[in-house]
Amino acid sequence: MKKNIIILIASVLLIVSPGCEDLNNPGEIKTKNSLFFNLQVNSPQQHVYIYRNPDITGSMEYNAADPYVNFFNKDAEITLKDMLNGQSTSFKLAQDTLDGSSYYTGYSYSNPYRPYYTNSVALNAKPLRDYFLSVNADGNSITGKVTTPGDFEIVSPHEGEVVRGQLNLAKFLFRWRSSENAKGYTVRINVIEKNFNKPVWISFVTYDTSKDLQSLSLLMSIFGSGIYTLQVIAFDENYFQHYYNKKEIVGLNGAYGCFSSSVVKEVRFRYISD
């Protein structure tokens, strides 16, 4: 009995005191910056987010109006290179604004929208292409590489198709061709024009990439007729590892975060309830 009690006490000590790690002194962080860039194939504009990692051992300034403003690195130099043709694209500073303006003219506290970088010249990323990312952030080098997923098409519904069904419960069968080099797909259904008040926005993820023809059978509540968009996003291994497996560094050297790629396809269709 005494021996069992000793073993129990020892087990508790192992749980509450794992090793000799000082939790109040986590030490220096591995990198000085964090970067998030999902390269979208066939998209005219890209978005890159890069931040200075705060010193977690000291005090941090926090702005409730915009928690990103103190950490966003607005001095970074970003270049993306197409490894097939050698073409390089640089990025400029921009900022989301209420009026749709894309240029960053200095942060305004009355406009708490996240700053980002976007391509300074036309960039049309290609499917199944290698891209190399190079960043100079306060003298720190960040590099990354992706191979974009292959192009594909949505088979059904096709653009402008009329789909008929019940008023309260619609049954859809979405089909699309497989994307080479894709790890999985995000499927999104959104209503953009309707004769009812309740918004509809649904998102699904599937990792079945073994079939040439992908499909998703879906029952969803419908509160009236309307025009919908079906969006299928084929994402790569890097995207999967970071956003779904929660790995802190994927596709990058010299920064936390993720450099990934995806292909987005979208069609509009009309649903008419009987």
Image (cartoon, rainbow, N blue to C red):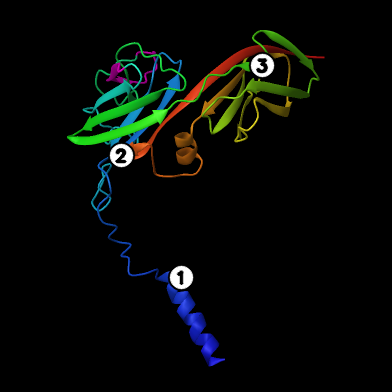
Relative to residue 253, is residue 37 depicted above or below? above
Return the mark for residue 52.
Answer: none
Q: Does the magenta stretch include residue 93?
A: yes
Q: Does residue 112 appear in the picture of this structure?
A: no
Marks 1 and 2 sit apart, C-alpha to C-alpha, by 34 Å
Q: Earlier in the sequence, mark 3 or mark 2?
A: 3
Q: Residue at x 30, y 26 (%)?
A: 109
N-term-proximal mark, 1 vs 2: 1
Whether 77 is among the magenta residues is no
Image: magenta residue range: 86-101
User: Residue 24's image quarter?
Assistant: bottom left
Classify mark 1: helix, strand or loop.
Answer: helix
Q: Residues within 10 Å of mark 1 (few under 14, many from 20)?
A: few
Q: Residue furthest top?
A: 160
User: Residue 60, position in %: x, y?
Assistant: 26, 45
Which quadrant holds the C terminus?
top right
User: In this figure, which residue is indicated by the disc labeled 2?
Assistant: 253
Residue type, numbered disc 2: Asn
| Rendering coords of residue 205 (x, y %) | 60, 33
The residue identified by callout 3 is 155
The residue under label 1 is 15
- Residue 169 appears in which quarter of the rendering? top right
**Of helix, strand and loop, which one carries label 2?**
strand
Instruction: Tell whether 133 sits left or right of 220.
Output: left
